[in-house]
């Protein structure tokens, strides 16, 4: 997989308010959208008939072949309505493109659409090889085509759901693992995956399907293959970093998801979190098995650094993410 893709959703409906219909915010969901490679697009967006603008979205496209998964939200993308040549809602993310030296990332695009089936899904850039530092990106594939699906207007509300990412530890591996997925938590708690136990630490986050404004972003997750001596996981809320893991270490690390949960990003210069945000610190074990630990506690960070772990993040305090504050008693 070489590229994250940016979603252009071609809508087979007119967005102008019909006579006699009260204007307002309308909620659209993707129903059963499938590409010819088996990948799916899912999610929803809110459209305001008064301002003719998108006011919220959470749309995910699965990976497959040479396409990385990506989740489009206001924190990592823009959304707008185009009316010509057909009604089209366009989601774009500069961070989802190819990072190039001395220039902003190039954008890519594709067009899943039920009404224009068999339309090509073409990367929005030349297909030639392009130098990226000392590495070369091969020519992109021909693209995807939509084979099924529909865009549906529903009455479902767009909500943000709170969750907790629970930390587990494996003494045999000396590895930490973080998950907000209920099925994974159950499997770890019941011993389906042997050797793991809760540490008692957790980070408050938003669930993957939540509707949120910037600076909240989806978190990607990679799995380091045991065959590469890793058997570890890596998380990032930075699309360009998610891309670089695949670009530079794609044979050792497999992307599992573009949206396992949601957090806010700190200011990349100061490391400051948004108001009420809780700093999350990332520490690297600096070993060939490449494990990271994520914590909101500076005391734990100090303890890990004393054991040889290295801090990674932004600003003088090296903050990598911003979690939700604890609930009020």
Image (spheres, helix red, strand yellow):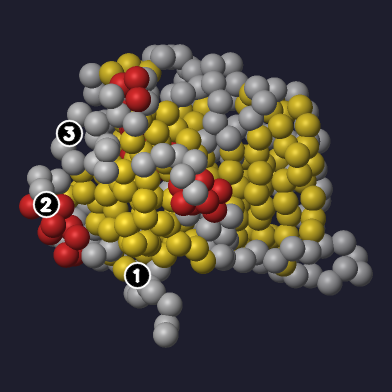
Element under label 1?
A: loop
- Residue 248 can be seen in this image: no
Between disc 3 and disc 1, whose residue precedes?
Answer: 1
Q: Residue furthest right?
A: 20
Q: Is residue 102 above or below residue 283?
A: above
Given residues 116 and 214, the one toward you in this image is 214
* Disc marking residue 305: 2
Q: Give the CA distance from mark 3 to mark 1.
A: 31 Å
Which quarter of the picture shows residue 128?
top left
Residue at 39%, 74% in the rendered image: 326
Say which residue label 1 marks. 277
Percent of width and height locating residue 292: 26, 44
Q: CA distance from mark 2 to mark 3?
A: 13 Å
Mark 1–mark 2 distance (CA, rounded to whole Å): 23 Å
Q: Residues within 10 Å of mark 1 (few under 14, many from 20)?
A: some
Query: Which disc is residue 147 wearing?
Result: none
Toward the viewer: 284 or 322? 284
Q: Which mark is residue 287?
A: 3
In the rendered view of the protein, which quadrant contains the C terminus? bottom left
């Amino acid at each position: 997989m070489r590229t994250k893709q940016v979603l252009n959703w071609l809508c087979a409906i007119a967005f102008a308010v019909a006579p006699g219909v009260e204007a307002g915010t309308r909620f659209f969901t993707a129903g059963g959208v499938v590409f010819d490679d088996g990948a799916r697009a899912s999610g929803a967006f809110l459209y305001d008939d008064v301002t003719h603008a998108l006011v919220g979205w959470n749309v995910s496209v699965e990976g497959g072949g040479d396409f990385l998964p990506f989740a489009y939200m206001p924190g990592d993308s823009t959304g707008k309505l185009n009316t010509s040549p057909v009604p089209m809602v366009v989601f774009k993310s500069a961070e989802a493109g190819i990072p190039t030296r001395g220039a902003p990332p190039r954008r890519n695009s594709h067009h899943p659409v039920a009404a224009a089936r068999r339309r090509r899904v073409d990367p929005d850039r030349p297909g030639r090889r392009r130098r990226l530092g000392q590495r070369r990106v091969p020519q992109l594939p021909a693209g995807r085509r939509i084979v099924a699906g529909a865009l549906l207007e529903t009455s479902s509300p767009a909500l943000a759901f709170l969750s907790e990412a629970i930390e587990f530890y494996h003494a045999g591996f000396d590895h930490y693992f973080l998950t907000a997925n209920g099925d994974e938590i159950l499997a770890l708690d019941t011993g389906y995956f042997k050797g793991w136990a809760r540490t008692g630490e957790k980070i408050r986050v938003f669930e993957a399907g939540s509707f949120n404004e910037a600076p909240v972003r989806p978190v990607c997750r990679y799995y380091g293959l045991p065959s590469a001596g890793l058997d570890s996981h890596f998380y990032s809320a930075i699309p360009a970093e998610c891309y670089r893991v695949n670009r530079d270490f794609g044979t050792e690390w497999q992307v599992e998801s573009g949206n396992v949960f949601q957090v806010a990003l700190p200011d990349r210069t100061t490391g400051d979190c948004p108001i009420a945000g809780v700093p999350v610190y990332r520490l690297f074990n600096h070993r060939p098995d490449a494990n990271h630990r994520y914590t909101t506690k500076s005391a734990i960070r100090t303890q890990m650094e004393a054991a040889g772990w290295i801090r990674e993040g932004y600003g003088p305090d090296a903050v990598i993410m911003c979690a939700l504050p604890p609930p009020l008693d």
